[in-house]
Structure formats: C-alpha cells, structure tokens
Amino acid sequence: MLVPDRLFHAALQKENDGCFEEAELGYQSALLEVKSRRFQSNKLKNAITEKLKVLNTVIEYRKMSKVNS
C-alpha cells in the first residue's frame, strides 16, 4: 500500500472510532502526500477532499451543540 493510501486508511479508522479531529489531521496529511506525488491520484485526492468537507461540518456541529448545551 502506498503512503497516501495508508494515511487515508488510518484516518478513516479514526473517523469510524469517532476521533474526528485526529481523522481530520490524518486526511490532511494524506492530501499533502497525494499532492507531493509526481503522479497524483485524482480519485484519492477527491475522496480526501470530500472527507475533509464532511469532517469540518461534523466538527463545527459538535462545537455548536456543546456551546448550546
């Protein structure tokens, strides 16, 4: 497995465990690795970008729900 794939997989496991902040960092690392490669995988890059969008929404929602509680 390539490095970006491993980072993506590890971030996905963190996300599934409910560790959203750690997952976000993992996805960001994977995205940086994908961008640093000579031959970028657009499919993986797009998947990571979409995951980051969803995670940002979830994290913001959790912050807002804590404030309102």
Image (cartoon, grey):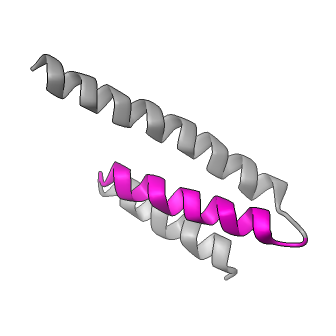
Q: Position of residue 24 (x, y in %)?
A: 46, 52
In this picture, residue 7 sits left or right of residue 22: right
Task: Say which quarter of the image contains residue 36.
Answer: bottom right
- Residue drawn at x 66%, y 59% is 31
Question: Residue reaching furthest right?
Answer: 39
In this picture, residue 20 sits left or right of residue 10: left
Picture quarter with the N terminus: bottom right
Q: Position of residue 37 (x, y in %)?
A: 82, 72
Task: Say which quarter of the image contains residue 68.
Answer: top left
Q: Position of residue 42 (x, y in %)?
A: 83, 54
Picture quarter with the C terminus: top left
In this picture, residue 49 sits left or right of residue 34: left
Task: Say which quarter of the image contains residue 49.
Answer: top right
Q: What range of the chain is rendered magenta?
A: 18-38
Query: How would you classify the magenta stretch by its main secondary structure?
Result: helix
Position of residue 35 relative to residue 60, above or below, is below
Q: Position of residue 65 (x, y in %)?
A: 21, 23
Observer-nearest residue: 15 or 22? Answer: 22
Question: Residue reaching furthest left?
Answer: 69
Position of residue 19 relative to residue 59, above or below, is below
- Residue drawn at x 90%, y 69% is 39
In this figure, what is the number of numbered marks? 0
Q: Is residue 9 magenta?
A: no
Q: Is residue 22 magenta?
A: yes
Question: Residue reaching furthest top?
Answer: 68
